[in-house]
Image (cartoon, rainbow, N blue to C red):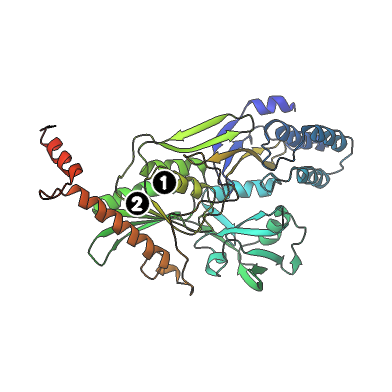
Amino acid sequence: MNIRKLLKNKFIILFATTFSCLFVNDFAEATVLNNSYKEVIDHVWQIVYRDFLDSSGKFQKSNWINLRKEVLSKTYSDSNEAYDAIRDMLSNLDDSYTRFLEPKEFNQMRIDTSGELTGIGIQIVKDKESDDLIIISPIEGTPAFDAGIKARDKILSIDDISTEGMNIEEAVKLIRGQRGTKVKLEILRGSKSFYKILSREKIEIKSVSSKVNQTKNGLLIGYVRIKQFNANASKETRDAIKDLETKKVAGYVLDLRSNPGGLLESSIDISRHFINKGIIVSTLSKDGLKETKRGNGQALTKKPLVVLVNEGSASASEIVSGAIKDNKRGKLVGKKTFGKGLVQSMRTLVDGSGLTVTVAKYLTPNGTDINKSGIIPDIEVKMNITPILPREIGTRKDKQYRAGEKELINIINSKNQISEFKPNTTNLNAFLKINKEEKVFSLN
């Protein structure tokens, strides 16, 4: 099959898993290779040569061209040899997000973004500098979350097999398995290591939950928690806001803590639920091409807003957080976010396998590149020293929520003070508002 022809016809779906991505579905044209393993190798090479954005500054096209000659001069007797050659080739890029997925792994990722997860509920990244396998965040409602796994925990071994030198694909193979079976992880947290034995499960995750919280002073607060930006998140968030609006809430606490990311378009849509106008996110390609997404003038609420974030808020979560902070739409409370500001394009290869390749970086509305640095909240608050129960998240037993609610009350009170005109004060904004409503204008 001619690679150029294959690349011309594509059905493109924008999405961002933990690795904010662009997903290209080529299954209609994907074929099983007939002793032509070099074709899939060259397909990978071509995509990287054309689209790869080098964030490290170490990529040299001349070296990549020489590498092509080397890999295509060899003979490959089966797909395993070809796949190993692809992984070796990609290791030269010094980019942990550009990686190869075998057909089963690729299909599982497609299932994951639909809202169904099989495994223990973690997403991992390979740290190029330390060579560690790092957990981005456990997903709420999964075995890993229930077992107390945390963002930035390091995996030292899987079923007593050391992860030293292990790539992500090998780790995923060992962690995933049949539903009901168990996997043992050795975890390093700070300077302490410990073991966790987890059951593998297949879980349908409801990405959004919401409720009304009442403050001590009787204010009604709309609490919305988004666990993952999957295919249903935007609609579920929209339904939650509409329902909370009917209950006359005075403001919102949006909880994005330990949310590892999800569909890119979902994060943009959810930002638009809160942001009426203004830039939401911009992406820069390797050619310097800039694409900007903005509010569409159809925000569902203009009420005061506080966003809760932490070290596990990554990728699409950072898009929403950055948009709200830079547009001064609300305040961020919690801890600095993960810091994943690179955009990947995910491609189906000619044999049904897949490739994620870094093609752009995203910037917050103010033009800030948050990759590796994360987003610093307006108010930094640590989580409870003693872990709280899942049912206590988003309640006054939750230290970060408590701080967020306090800030939201301050915002609501300050807005109320401005909107109430007092004749014996110089409250000009309220005076002008009253006279505008009465259609009386006087500038003496």
Q: Nearer the viewer, residue 79 or 296?
A: 296
Q: Specify the amino acid type for callout 1.
A: Ile
- Provide residue 222's location: percent of width, then percent of height: 31, 56
Confirm whether residue 230 shows in the render.
no
Quarter of the image where the C terminus is located: top left
Q: Specify the amino acid type for callout 2.
A: Leu
SS of the residue at dot 1? Answer: helix
Query: At 45% across and 63% down in the image, what residue appears?
Result: 381
Q: Is residue 16 above or below residue 288?
A: below
Residue found at the very far right of the displayed protein:
74
To which residue does mark 1 refer? 324
Query: At 64% across and 67% down in the image, what residue appears?
Result: 181
Task: Mark 2 or mark 1: name the one nearer the start of the chain.
Answer: 2
Q: Could you tell me if the residues under marks 2 and 1 are in contact, i.e. CB atoms within 8 Å? A: yes
Q: Nearer the viewer, residue 114 or 61?
A: 61
Confirm whether residue 444 shows in the render.
yes
To which residue does mark 2 refer? 305
